Amino acid sequence: MAASAREVDMAARSAKASRDEVRDELLAAGLSVSAVAAGMADRFGLRPRLAWRYALDWPQWRLAQEFRVANPGLAVTESRISEWENWPYGGTKPTPEALAGLAVAFGHGCAPADLVDALDLAHLSRAEQALFVRPVVSATSPALVGNAKNGLDFHPDWALSLGEAMTMWQQDMNRRDFLLGAGFSASAYTVPAFRWLTAPPAADPVGTGSRLVGTPDIELIHQMLRAFREVDNRFGGGQVRDAVVRFLSTDVAALLQGRYDRAVGSCLLSAAAQVTQLAAWTSYDVGRHATAQRYLTQALRMAAAADDRPLGAEILAAMSHQAAYLRHGMEAVDLARAAERAATDSGIGALAAEAAVLEAQGHAVLGDQAASAVALDRAERAFDKAANTATPQWLGYFDQSYLAAKFGQCFTALGRGDLALPFAQRSLDMDSAYARGRQFNLALLARAHHQTGEVEQAAEVAVDAAKAAVELKSERSRDYLRDLASRLAPHVGLTKVQEFMSLLSPAQAP
């Protein structure tokens, strides 16, 4: 006999009362929201997406609302939330971006991997699984091969350098405190850059392992790269770094130890270098500069083994970028010049423009306005010519808005907010997919306004920058907010400054 509507309603109320009671008990015990979600999933057999919503005591309409607030521009309805929660029994499969958006909406340290379970993984492709699976590893697991030393070696033998890189990946994946006590040394980039420019051609990258590696394996790496980069650009390095390292340590390492000829080996090493560079970039973004430095060094070595000169130039440019951010102006200039030399040899105009503008930034860090102006002029001319040359897919971010932001950063570093202002404004005419970059550019615009004495305007834009940072897991984002807070602190009597300060976490407040 079918249950009446009243009986169904009473059962639903009873189930909710039971969930509320358990949730309140767990919260009263001082458990985190993550632990409460895990406890409720275990107690009631809930799927993780539902468990997190119940742990926060949110109805579906509230989650849809929080999702829209946390992810501006993504229109999600209560119905879509229901479809994501019901999948794979029905409903709609949540994309990696959707899961990342849910994690941001839930907050409380939630990560996309927290929102999938074994049933979800069984219905995902291998590429998608690598984004979310949490392998069980031991903190004392032995290294795969080679001797990691400190990760700063640019070994003449490409095969030995792979052993060093793979050891580093494994140690990073197994230890949360990997290299946290190590320091960044700008001068440590000197030898890798010199060897990149002067080393003779490497031996053919041929693998002699048992597993046959082919084009589909390399395409998988590129698919994963696209997914990782999308999450990184939208949500920050902290949202995806662990997944990138895990992918390197498991999937990419296994392929590198396989069997392949020179043609496949070159493509494989180039792809592996790009993933390693992304691991460096996400490490840099979360403030782990020593780790980032080692990943960039190993990425450069792989690019050399692949004989991928344009990619090597891009990695040298990334080294310069990091050095300038950490106020090592001279090293930033040297690395940018090395990148420009390699870019010019490759005939890629956009890459040469990027290297030139990074040299300008290094000069700006040193306070050399004349040298910075010369490099900026060279960057602009190279960019104007870039339309006539092919641009690699991995350089797709370098456009007019990015160049404008770099010009603005140079001028603010020189204290010339008047010159920076139009470039900072132009930099905001950008692709919405680059949410982190937009937050950076808002902070740049606020800084330029402040340098011109326009405190009210600076505070108004700073409010936008603080709001844009809410969904980001990026130490650079927080660093820019701290800088704005220190600049605006003397004007705390202004309403907009007070609003900005109210949006900051205690760690960001002056």
Image (cartoon, grey):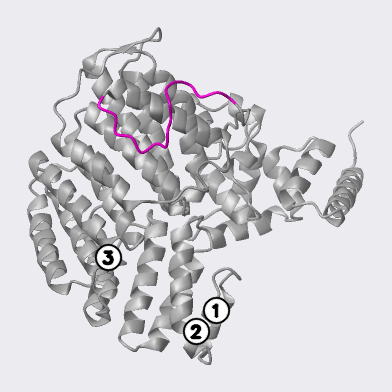
- Residue beneath label 3, please? 405
Image position, residue 15 (x, y; %): 87, 45
Q: What's the amino acid at mark 1? A: Met
* Quadrant of the image occupied by residue 360: bottom left
Tell me where residue 501 appears, x and y as whole percent.
55, 79
Q: Residue shown at 38%/53% (left/top)?
A: 433
Q: Residue at x 29, y 30 (%)?
A: 302
How far apart, in angstroms, are the residues tagged by discs 3 and 2?
A: 25 Å
Q: Which mark is residue 501?
A: 1
Position of 267 compared to 74: left or right? left
Q: Mark 1, residues whose alpha carbon is within 10 Å: few (<14), some, or many (≥20)? A: many
Is residue 116 shown above or below 63? above
**Magenta residues, as a range?**
141-156
The numbered mark, 1 or 2, whose residue comes first in the sequence reads 2
Q: Residue at x 50, y 57 (%)?
A: 472
Answer whether residue 244 is magenta in the image. Answer: no
Q: CA distance from mark 1 to mark 3?
A: 25 Å
Q: Is residue 360 left or right of residue 289?
A: left
| Secondary structure state at the residue bearing disc 3 | helix
* Residue named by callout 2: 489
Whichever of labels 1 and 3 marks the residue nearer the N terminus, that label is 3
For the residues labelled 1 and 2, the Cα–Cα distance comes to: 8 Å
